[in-house]
Amino acid sequence: MVHQQKAALAGSARMELVSGVVQLRPEDAMFDAMLRGWRGQQKSRGLKDETIDPRERLIRRFLDFTNEYPWQWTPAHMDEWSASLTSEKHLAPSTIRSYQGTVRLFTELLIDARYGWGPACEKAFGAYPVAIAYEWNTLPHLQDYEGDPEARPFTREELQRFLDYADDQVARAVKSKRKGALAAYRDATLFKVIYGWGLRRTETSKLDVVDFGRNPKAHQFGRYGTLNVRYGKAKKGQPPRRRNLLSVMDWAVEAVADYVENVRPRFGFPDHPALWISERGGRLQPGSINDRFEAYRDALKLPKDLVPHSIRHSYVTHLTEDGVDRRFIQQQVGHECDSSTAIYTHVSDDFMNTALSKALAPAFAGA
């Protein structure tokens, strides 16, 4: 265990900085090393250049805006930058939130003690990076959906390809006997749970094993007949909203049951309450879910407008196409208004044609 702690992590200062070399522009050299380290850390998690390159360009733009180096950044810089994105560039809230999230990811690497950037900066410049993105200076996700209402969910064929690819990564890891098989299995199951219960990404990350329960009217699902979501999307100034979901997809129940009973125990950490745990024993965070999703989406060359939230949209759309009562779907996904559910619903042309034919049939019956 001691040996593992001493080993340099991908993205660490120890991996990127060359000792004993005098740099003509040490500040620029340190910043470039940080970006190389961040790229290496993202690559180690399976992200592609198509995902990493725009993130790096954004960090360089943030540097230009602040006219300061990362070890000099403060929360005030984030405040000023966010204000400019709103008042000067007039960007959409979802875009601003994405930009803020990218800066947060970069600075989280720099302040993580495991990567050693803080001590390296303090030794070189007498200052060190600090956290600059907080709940109070970044946009909260207060609405269910802020994007273009025409943005579509997965088609059934796309979703099947995505889930199959996630399963394939498990099989490949097991066959090659390489590390990551447990994490790949965890993530394949996680995506099935998002779809199987129509969850948001943050709701999913905060699930505990004990959140599943029995449904007396659906004995076939055993202890996975209901799911208690304790951290639903909150209204402004209010605590998270709870809701209790009914299980409706038997294959999703089978997937999570197999994971909980046969795979999760192999991570160790039997006393940890989280449903999804990391290999180091922490709770899986939403950013990690997003990274794995993007890696799989990009590997399949699926459209980049598909995001983890698209899986939740698919749950609503596919249940609608299958004839499930709209009020039930609304309660399942935690929408107070049917109009919110309507935004999520993008039924296929085949479904629309079938529905239209049924609607017009009585009118032409006597013709």
Image (spheres, rainbow, N blue to C red):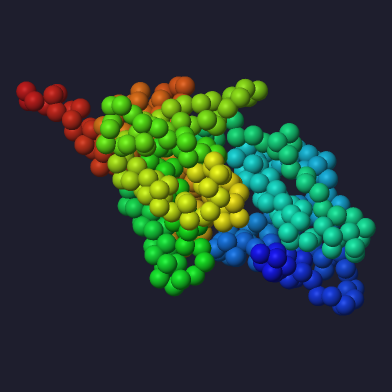
Counting from the top left corner in percent of width and height, residue 244 is at 43, 27
Q: Within the image, what quadrant is residue 327 found in?
A: top left
Q: Nearer the viewer, residue 274 or 87?
A: 274
Q: In the image, 157: left or right of 132?
A: left
Q: Within the image, what quadrant is residue 91 found in?
A: top right
Q: Residue furthest left?
A: 366
Q: Residue furthest right?
A: 126
Q: Residue at x 23, y 33 (%)?
A: 355
Q: In the image, 291: left or right of 327?
A: right
Counting from the top left corner in percent of width and height, residue 32 is at 77, 66
How many numbered tags mark residues here? 0
Q: Is residue 302 above or below residue 360?
A: below
Q: Residue at x 67, y 36 (%)?
A: 139
Q: Within the image, what quadrant is residue 301 found in?
A: bottom left
Q: Which quadrant of the figure contains the C terminus? A: top left
Asked whether the viewer can see residue 39, the reply is no
Q: In the image, 235: left or right of 59?
A: left
Q: Nearer the viewer, residue 152 or 299?
A: 299
Q: Nearer the viewer, residue 174 or 99?
A: 174
Q: Residue at x 93, y 58 (%)?
A: 126
Q: Residue at x 88, y 69 (%)?
A: 25
Counting from the top left corner in percent of width and height, residue 109 is at 71, 56
Q: Which quadrant of the figure contains the N terminus? A: bottom right
Counting from the top left corner in percent of width and height, residue 262 is at 40, 52
Asked whether the viewer can see residue 77, the reply is yes
Q: Nearer the viewer, residue 347 or 105?
A: 105
